[in-house]
Image (cartoon, rainbow, N blue to C red):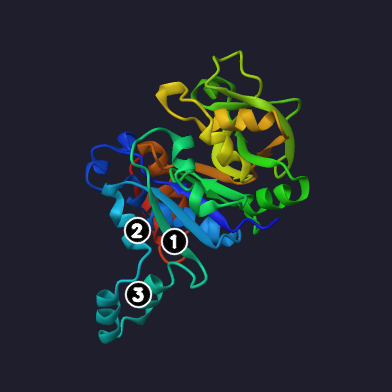
Amino acid sequence: MTIRKAILPVAGLGTRFLPASKSIPKEMVTVVDRPAIEYVVREAVEAGIEQIILVTHSSKASIENYFDRNFELETTLEQKKKFDLLKEITEILPEHVSVISVRQPQPLGLGHAVLCAKEVIGQEDFAVLLPDVLVKSKENTSDLTLMIDHFSQRKHAQIMVEAVPDHMVDQYGIVDVAAAPAEGESVVMQGIVEKPAVGTAPSTLSVVGRYILPARIMELLENTPKGAGNEIQLTDAIAALQLEQSVDAYRMKGQTFDCGSKLGYLKAVLHYGIEHPKLGNEFKALIQELPL
């Protein structure tokens, strides 16, 4: 089973990133030299995704514009013979990949955002990538690619998870599994517990923000009542799916950065900065000069 479509919910107001997100979509805040959302789109494309579906809001037009062509800018760069820059802006998206947008008219939760893309998804299985979270691979094969492979082999929905310290489990959705899988492996999960109290969590594996889901989840979302926060929760629909078929927790190999939070964003800038092909060495030297 090939996964061709990915939903990226970008309609949120980004309150954790205020005041910057008052006028700039949090997804467009740059990590080194490109917006955070480009890293997420690249992750999807490298895993074989051919259609990116942005579930967006009227204030987020700059995201759509970023993935569109800007012929005036391209012409100017060509005339000035700035061919390196021209290549960078025209190759943001491969030619075989399309980006389309659908609107989420009201902020009714992640489940509702996914449901907004129902007509575009049709009867296809699909991925969901939360753009707040950057996932950095440690190996040549990305975690998203491995998730899709597991989905194809096991025919189970895949939920990406990572281990967190015991004292931080109350900050995340934690999966209930009989035994923690090795990194890069999947195991059937019993459920997801939202922000359990320290000492009561069924595991230390937290949900990361990457999902491979069957088309059936859309029908379940249509019948999912509003839950926590008076919103339609994706986890409630996943719980309903588990009554019909197995759902797996996939334990990631790489590293995550929560770019929805200011500290997580700064951590991402550091990590991506020191590995930047052009700026990395100078950036490392700059860090060493800081009076820490």
Q: Residue at x 61, y 36 (%)?
A: 162
Q: Dividing the image into 4 quarters, which one contains the C terminus? A: top left
Q: Earlier in the sequence, mark 3 or mark 2?
A: 2
Q: Is residue 121 above or below residue 234?
A: below
Q: Amino acid at mark 3?
A: Leu
Which quadrant of the view contains residue 81? bottom left
Q: Which residue is mark 1?
A: 99
Q: Residues within 10 Å of mark 2 (few under 14, many from 20)?
A: few
- Classify mark 2: helix, strand or loop: helix
CA gap between label 3 and label 2 equals 20 Å
Q: Is residue 240 above or below residue 13?
A: above
Q: Which residue is mark 2?
A: 64
Q: Amino acid at mark 2?
A: Glu
Q: Which residue is mark 3?
A: 85
**Mark in front: 3 vs 1:** 1
Say left or right for 258 vs 47: left
Q: Amino acid at mark 1?
A: Val
